[in-house]
Image (cartoon, rainbow, N blue to C red):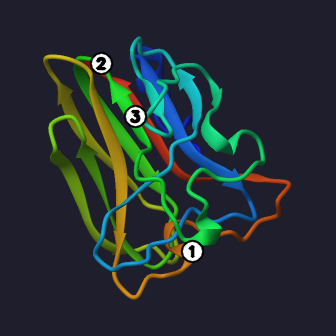
């Protein structure tokens, strides 16, 4: 589900950070236990980062800016959001320094769901994508964000139409443990 080849010109001409929610192929993306409630996507992997000051905070403690796995999902270990127990990591976020950004987001839930970008620092919703049935495809969304004053923290969220109490609601666990899969894929380009 990598977006790395979708915008080669953007990537060559603009600084970029590429982050994902990567898990073992036999682990789902997380539970949605309540309909019409926003659940934060885990972010535990950086594929590339050429934006100084940008990074991820998988557990809202340490800012990670270099390529690799971070949090409890290192390699093929236990996922941060423990989806087998139905809990979610509402703390996972990414950080952007002052600038203007074009953001691409690809999602891998099943069933009917929505996505939104939430600005934690300013306590506002930057953009919301309406409900779509994702049963047969992994949709991509894009938006523009301006960060002024100082660095800001964001999270990518999903909500589902109930009843959605399945591990598949935030991404299926249909592959073997020997594979890594991405349940959410975000590319952020600094355009100004």
Residue 118 makes an appearance in the image: yes
**Of 152 and 115, which appears nearest the observer?**
152
Locate residue 86, reporting x and y percent: 54, 71
Q: Is residue 44 above or below residue 64?
A: below
Tag count = 3
* Quadrant in which residue 40 is drawn: bottom left
Locate residue 181, reporting x and y percent: 68, 53
Locate residue 151, reporting x and y percent: 26, 21
Q: Is residue 20 above or below residue 53?
A: below
Cα separation, mark 3 vs mark 2, equals: 10 Å
Identify the disc placed on residue 101.
none
Q: What residue is disc 3 on? A: 94
Q: What residue is disc 1 on? A: 168
* Residue at 44 percent of width and 73 percent of height: 32
Are discs 1 and 2 less than 8 Å apart at CB? Answer: no
Between discs 1 and 3, the one toward the N terminus? 3
User: Left or right: where does residue 160 sit relative to residue 123?
Assistant: right
Q: Is residue 17 above or below residue 79?
A: above
Residue 9 makes an appearance in the image: no
Between discs 1 and 2, the one toward the N terminus? 2
Q: What residue is disc 2 on? A: 97
Name the secondary structure under disc 3.
Answer: strand
Q: Answer few, some or many: residues within 10 Å of disc 3's Cα (few below 14, many 20 plus, some between 14 and 19).
A: many
Locate residue 58, reporting x and y percent: 50, 39
Q: Answer few, some or many: residues within 10 Å of disc 1's Cα (few below 14, many 20 plus, some between 14 and 19).
A: many
Q: Answer few, some or many: residues within 10 Å of disc 2's Cα (few below 14, many 20 plus, some between 14 and 19).
A: many
Name the secondary structure under disc 2.
Answer: loop
**Of 67 and 91, which appears nearest the observer?**
91
């Amino acid at each position: 589900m990598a977006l790395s080849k979708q915008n080669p010109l953007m990537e060559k001409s603009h600084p970029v950070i590429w982050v994902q929610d990567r898990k073992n192929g036999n682990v789902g993306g997380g539970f949605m236990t309540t309909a019409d409630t926003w659940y934060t996507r885990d972010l535990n992997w950086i594929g590339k980062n050429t934006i100084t000051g940008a990074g991820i905070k998988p557990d809202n403690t340490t800012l990670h800016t270099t390529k690799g796995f971070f949090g409890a999902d290192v390699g093929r270990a236990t996922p941060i959001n423990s989806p087998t127990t139905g809990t979610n990591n509402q703390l996972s976020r990414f950080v952007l320094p002052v600038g203007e950004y074009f953001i691409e987001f690809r999602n891998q839930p099943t069933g009917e769901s929505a996505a939104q970008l939430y600005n934690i620092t300013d306590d506002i919703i930057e953009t919301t994508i309406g409900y779509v049935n994702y049963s047969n495809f992994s949709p991509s969304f894009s938006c523009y964000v301006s960060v002024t004053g100082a660095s800001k923290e964001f999270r990518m969220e999903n909500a589902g139409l109930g009843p959605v109490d399945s591990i598949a609601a935030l991404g299926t666990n249909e592959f073997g443990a020997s594979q890594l899969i991405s349940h959410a894929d975000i590319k952020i380009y600094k355009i100004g």
